[in-house]
Image (cartoon, helix red, strand yellow):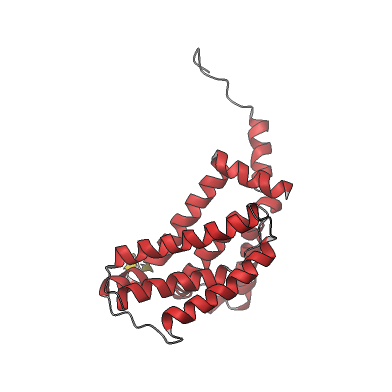
Amino acid sequence: GELPGEPPSPPRSSLWRRFRVKASFRYVSALYILGLMIVVFSIWEPHTFLTVLTWRLLLDNQAISMIVAVALVVPLSAGIIDLAVGTEVGVGAVVVAWLIADKSLGVPLALGLALVAGAAIGLIIAALIVKARIGSFIVTLAMSSILLALIDGISGSEPIQVVSSGFHTIATGELFGVVYPVYFAAAVSAIVWYVLEHTSFGRRVYATGANS
C-alpha cells in the first residue's frame, strides 16, 4: 500500500509502455545491430570470437573510437553534421603530444589545455552555425581543412615522440585486465546518456534537432 502523502505509483501498464518505447529499435537500434553482429560472428567463428582475449582486444582497440562516436551523438541529436570530428581528434592528440614533448608540460596540464583547445574549436563551429547561419556541412568541412593545416603546422608533418611514463600509463595502463581508455569511454557514455535523457539541456538538444 501507499503511505499518506506519498505520490501514487504509476500503473504497471504505463511503466511497461515506457519501457517498450525506450527499448524500441528507434531508440536503441545500435544495441540491436550489435547483438546481431555478436550472433553472426559467434556462429561464424565460435572458437575465436567467443574468447576473453578477443573481447579484450576489441575493447582495447575501439575505446577511442567509442569516445568519438559518443561525442558525435550530441551534435547529431541537435541536427548538426560534424564532418571535422576526425581532425578535431587529431588536433587534440597533436596538442597534447606537442605540449608534453616540446614544451615539457605535465600530463594533467597538457590534457587540460588540449580540452580547452577542443572547446574553443567547438565554440567557433557553433558560432558559425548558429550566429552566422552557415550550414553545418559547409562549416565543418571547411574547419576540417583548417585543422589539417594546424596539425601539419604544429607537428611539422612529423610524428611527435612522447616519452612521458605518466602519459603512457593513461593510454596503456590496465585495471582488471582492461586498459584505462575503456573505462574512460564507459564514463563518457554514461555522462552523455544522463545529460541527454535526464536534463533540461538534453531536452533542448532533442528539440533543436526535431525542429531543424
Q: Where is residue 79 in the image (x, y as percent from the top left)?
A: 68, 54
Q: Which residue is drawn at 38% across and 82% down?
A: 160
Q: Where is residue 168 in the image (x, y as percent from the top left)?
A: 32, 74
Q: Is residue 55 visible?
A: no
Q: Quadrant of residue 19?
A: top right
Q: In this view, does 19 lie above or below 33?
A: above
In the rendered image, the residue lying farthest to the top is: 4
Q: Position of residue 105 (x, y in %)?
A: 28, 70
In the rendered image, the residue lying farthest to the bottom is: 158
Q: Where is residue 207 in the image (x, y as percent from the top left)?
A: 67, 43
Q: Can residue 111 be seen in this view?
A: yes
Q: In this view, does 195 lie above or below 43?
A: above
In the rendered image, the residue lying farthest to the front is: 132
Front-most of residues 49 and 129: 129
Front-most of residues 117 and 24: 117
What is the number of callouts on the image? 0
Q: Quadrant of residue 175?
A: bottom left
Q: In this view, does 58 lie above or below 67?
A: below
Q: Which residue is drawn at 64% across and 27% down?
A: 11
